[in-house]
Amino acid sequence: MKYRIKFSKHGSMKFIGHLDVMRYFQKAFRRSKIEVKLSEGFSPHQIMSFASPLGIGLTTDGDYLDVTLVDDTLTTDYIFEKLQAEMNGEINLVHVSELSDDAKNSMSIVCACDYEVFVKPDKLSKFSKEYFSNLSENAEKFLEQETIVVTKKTKKSEKEMDIKEYIYEFRGVENKAHSSDDSTPPNLLFMRLTSGSVLNIKPELVMESFCKFLSIPYDFLDYQINRTEMYADKNAVKGQVNTLTSEIKCDLVPLEDFN
């Protein structure tokens, strides 16, 4: 039986890389005595896949893994309870859903992600009050540009591309964690970006472009990025990215609701 598990990762665990997160869950399943089905072949491994690896230093409220279990009688509540008991407090389960046998794995269907980007508390002094008070207005102006050209780098090359149509949302929002002692920023940026194997737009790339638009220096260490949700597209076409303005418009659904 296939299941999709939504989880969060915060605190010091944000410095743990993708392979270690995978090992973490492999061991958590063993400790919970929930048997994961093994692949066949010379070197069998647990049948488990993640929607999209998260970069080092990023936190998340909405990452996903798909897993195939041996016992097809287990309920989602049972899996949640037993597995959550093995979490360390900085990685926690959010939701467990059952998948049909022919459901595609989340890695192959993810097409967009939501992110929150905010200034780290110890970097607040580098930013003026105007930066925060004008954040919503400047975010709106940034998205109103005819083009948003960035330099996208890969392991083999780099090229300029216009990413405007791949930014589904970009806006300033109130920071719910803001405290009266000003130890946290009053507001932050929310962005929804194209993601997946066909085209992946990183939030760091958008932030660098936004800082350039504002004529302020960009230092990735000034910002904390938190991924909040991942989506599949009901209208997905293999090898193609649907946007809000394309002929076939995207119809986004959170992965926990997509089967």
Image (cartoon, helix red, strand yellow):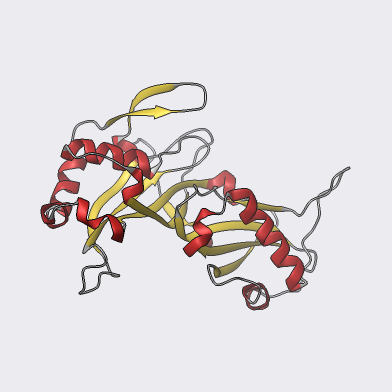
Is residue 247 rendered to the left or right of residue 4? left
Of 148 and 101, nearer the camera is 148
Query: For the image shown, how many numbered marks are present on the structure?
Result: 0
Question: Residue 232: percent from the left, percent from the top?
Answer: 49, 50
Q: Residue 148's quadrant in the figure?
A: top left
* 17 lies left or right of 204: right
Give how far across and how far down residue 211 sits, in percent: 23, 40
Q: Is residue 259 visible?
A: no
User: Is residue 3 visible in the rendered structure shown here?
Assistant: yes
State the quadrant of the N terminus: bottom right
Q: Residue at x 79, y 51 (%)?
A: 45
Please tell me which residue is depicted at 24% across the width and 73% down the height of the picture.
Answer: 179
Q: x, y percentage for residue 30?
A: 76, 66
Instruction: Locate the C terminus by quadrant.
Output: bottom right
Residue 196 is situated, as x and y percent measured from the top left of the image, at 50, 41
The residue under the point 69% across, 56% down is 23
Looking at the picture, does residue 25 appear above or below residue 94?
A: above
Q: Residue at x 59, y 71 (%)?
A: 88
Instruction: Establish if 163 lies above or below 28.
Output: above
Front-most of residues 184 and 172:
184
